[in-house]
Image: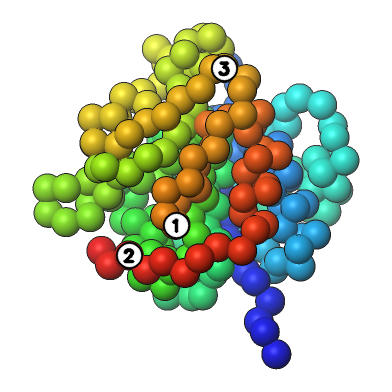
Amino acid sequence: MPHRSRALFIVTNTERVSGMSNPTGFDIREAAHVWSALRDHDHEISFASVAGGSVEGVLKGELLPPIRSFVGNFEGHGVVPTVTVRSQVGRRHDLLYFVGGLGCLWDFPRQPDIHALIRDALRRGTRIAAICHGPAAFVGLAESPGRPFVAGRRLTAFSDAEEAARGVLDTLPFSLERQLLADGAEVCVGPDGGSNVIVDGPLVTAQNPSSLPELCAVVTAPAPLERTVL
């Protein structure tokens, strides 16, 4: 009997940052739409964060049905229980999904447990998706000594133009777009508010919440098995 597909959503623990008036937790839209699409395809879904524990998301935009379903599924309306990322290294997952949110820029980059999880997933042929600020998980990950994992790979992320339009670019710890470019990635960004999803081997990256319908279509479609040795 075929196994039930398993997806692991990785979310930020950084819910507030000194000097920023708005919360910085994971974007509930980006979790809810993918969560709903995967549940419709009978995926088993769990949540992880670096520190574990209850993590509060940020509710933005219109309360569409997937968002209402998501917040109603968890006690606290947008607060999700998470296990630690470290506890998931070595476990089978069919999809890793790095959910966006400004807080990702603080606790995803250069994080040893996150990088161990990605390495293990690549060895197993697991698909890895990330949206918005989620690709911060790739910052500091090396494919070999002196060569960043993203070097030569096509991907996307929330752009500097989008950060600037929201007045936060100068308050962030670094520019994700410029960091990925500096690490050798081919960063493909589209216009603010436009859908943009890039698939490069096992990696699926989406630029912004407007990309969610396209991202859901990609991650619910069968993926070819591709193993990458790091």
Q: Which residue bears the numbered disc 2? A: 228
Callout 3 amino acid: Asp
Can you say whether 125 is above or below 28 in the image? below
Which quarter of the figure is the C terminus placed in?
Answer: bottom left
Can you say whether 211 is above or below 69 in the image? above
Can you say whether 103 is above or below 225 in the image? above
Callout 2 amino acid: Thr
Task: Please give the name of the residue rendered at 67% of the width and 57% of the height, measured from the top-left corner.
Answer: 220
Residue 12 drawn at (x, y percent): 52, 43
Checking the image for residue 34, the label placed there is none
Packing grade of label 2 (10 A; few <14, some 14-19, many >=20) is some
Q: Which residue bears the numbered disc 1? A: 202
Checking the image for residue 192, the label placed there is 3
In this rendered view, identify the residue nearer to me: 207 or 51: 207
Q: Are marks 2 and 1 in contact (CB under 8 Å)?
A: yes
Task: Please give the name of the residue rendered at 37% of the width and 40% of the height, measured from the top-left corner.
Answer: 154
Packing grade of label 1 (10 A; few <14, some 14-19, many >=20) is some
Task: Please give the name of the residue rendered at 85% of the width and 35% of the height, measured from the top-left corner.
Answer: 64
| Label 2 SS | loop
